[in-house]
Amino acid sequence: TFTREGFQWTPTTGLQQGLPCEAVIQPPEIIEKPRQVFDVLIIGAGYTGLTAARDLTTAGFKTLMLESRDRVGGRTWTSHVDGYPFEMGGTWVHWFQPHVYRELSRYGMKSELVHCPDYSKKKNHFTFVTKHGRRDMSHEEEQELTARALGKFVDIDGNRGKTVMPFPFNSGWNKVILKFAHMSVADRVEQIKHQLSEEERHAIEAVVLVCSGGTRENSAFLDFLRWWAASNHDYETFMDSVMVFKLKCGQSAFALKFLHESLQTGNLSYSFNTVVSHVDSSGDSAEVRTNDGRQFFAKRIISTIPLNVLTKVHFNPPLDPSKVEASTLKHVNQCVKVHAEVKDPEMRSWSGITYPNNKLLLGAGDGTTPSGNTHIVFFGCEQNHLQPDENVEETLQAIKEFTPMDVERLVFHNWSKDEFAEGAWVWYRPGMEVKYLDALRRRQGGVLFANSDWAEGGWRSFIDGAIQSGTEAALIIKDELQPKKLNSRI
Ligand code: FAD
């Protein structure tokens, strides 16, 4: 099966839209009794919606899931091209991410984890291109440089952030954090510039912008501190958590486990290619309308619509003004993720950074395809933004800025132009978390708002945050709709 999403380019085919994807669901709709009042209607089949659907259907609730795309997974999906899994969105997971690892374990998928870096091949080095020139170094030197630089970046308390943010799942644990809540990445770099060598500054900015997908000025320092704190305030754990372990079978195979378990209960109805346009929860039961003019009814709604597109849906009673403000401001992540298949198998051990003059910031050998080519994953951000579907030549040129390589294929999804996400994983603007997080998490009557974009903390913005958020929403609804059962157990 093919999804209409994503792009592939090869020198012979040129640019083509649409990619093979096992997460496309056939048949696209199963709704036996569309006029019934469902217990729960879930908008969105990303990890938040899938987790909520699984937890509610297995608890016996009649659930309807409506999804605008033709597939499950939302901002996380895999395309197998010539037998190799390219991750178009969410990719890396770690056992330090408690919610996602619990699910991997529950579905018997622990042995699916593979280790991405492989430093056993000949081109075993790191290329660092800055405005001062090009330098190849060993991976040990790269790690030493980056660890030292990031260590300075997060050291706001003489304890690498640990005193100020001891518990990332509740970032307000220590109120001193408020002093840093309005700080941008640029502000923090400015504060420590006298302690930094040029190389250290370039390393900090490149790595942090790959994390934020934004610009130096619009990316909150606090979000980086949270990632760091969730990684035990330690560079090695940080890297291991965010870019080392992925799934051999691909993320889509994982996402499908949730769907299949829900379907097995007989309690799940669903419709793909169905865009929700209106949510009306002013009456006894909530009503949802779709772009193609259909109406559905449910006792509760879980909206998993992401932050940057939340205001595209019309809510009655209207969305809380703070939600509207945050969604209108948008989070900053305009990450560009481009996969390249390159001819040289020795490149498997290579990685590099080009900053600040290139449209792609970071590249790393991430796998070997069945034909023996190296898969390299590249990242860019809003600063110096690239639209790969608009200009393949420019994309190839940006790749070659790292080091010469023979590109046989490009595979990518343009998240900036994605109408159901308008961006990648969440990264707040300075001050946004303290101003809007509580409001974003707040329910409105029978409508709950769940998404990784405003997960409680810790791994907000990750798959882990999505699973956490879906779990919490399902639990609230279970408690509300099943009070008698719960009471009789006590
Ligand atoms: P989404 O996945 O966005 O799900 C929301 C769903 O709602 C979507 O399917 C959308 O189509 C649907 N929807 C929206 N509007 C409507 C509407 N009006 N009607 C019906 N349906 C609608 N996380 C990691 O843990 N590790 C990583 O390595 C990682 N890398 C990433 C790389 C990229 C390029 C991107 C984009 C994300 C990455 N993430 C990563 C983040 C992770 O993918 C997300 O945090 C997670 O998938 C979000 O899940 P969600 O269910 O909360 O939201």
Image (cartoon, rainbow, N blue to C red):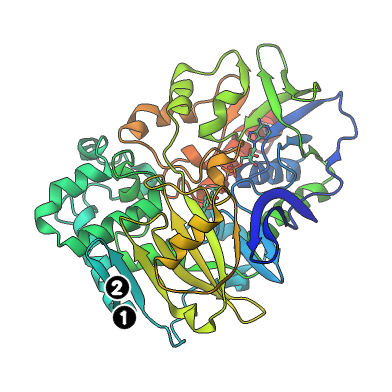
Residue 52 visible, this orientation: yes
Secondary structure under tag 1 reads: loop
Position of residue 405 relative to residue 51, above or below, is below
Say which quarter of the image contains residue 317. Answer: top right
- Tell me if label 2 and label 1 are in contact, CB under 8 Å: yes
- Percent position of residue 350, x then y: 43, 76
Q: Amino acid at mark 2?
A: Glu
Name which residue lies at 58% across and 50% down: 389
- Percent position of residue 122, x then y: 44, 88
Point out the quarter of the image occupied by ligand 1: top right
Residue at numbered disc 1: 138
> Which is more toward the observer, 336 or 392?
392
Residue at numbered disc 2: 142
Check disc 2: other Cα within 10 Å, few if <14, some if 14-19, many if 20+: some
Residue 167 visible, this orientation: no
> Which is more toward the observer, 95 or 72?
72
Secondary structure under tag 2 reads: helix
Report the Cα–Cα distance between label 2 and label 1. 6 Å
Say which quarter of the image contains residue 488. Answer: top right
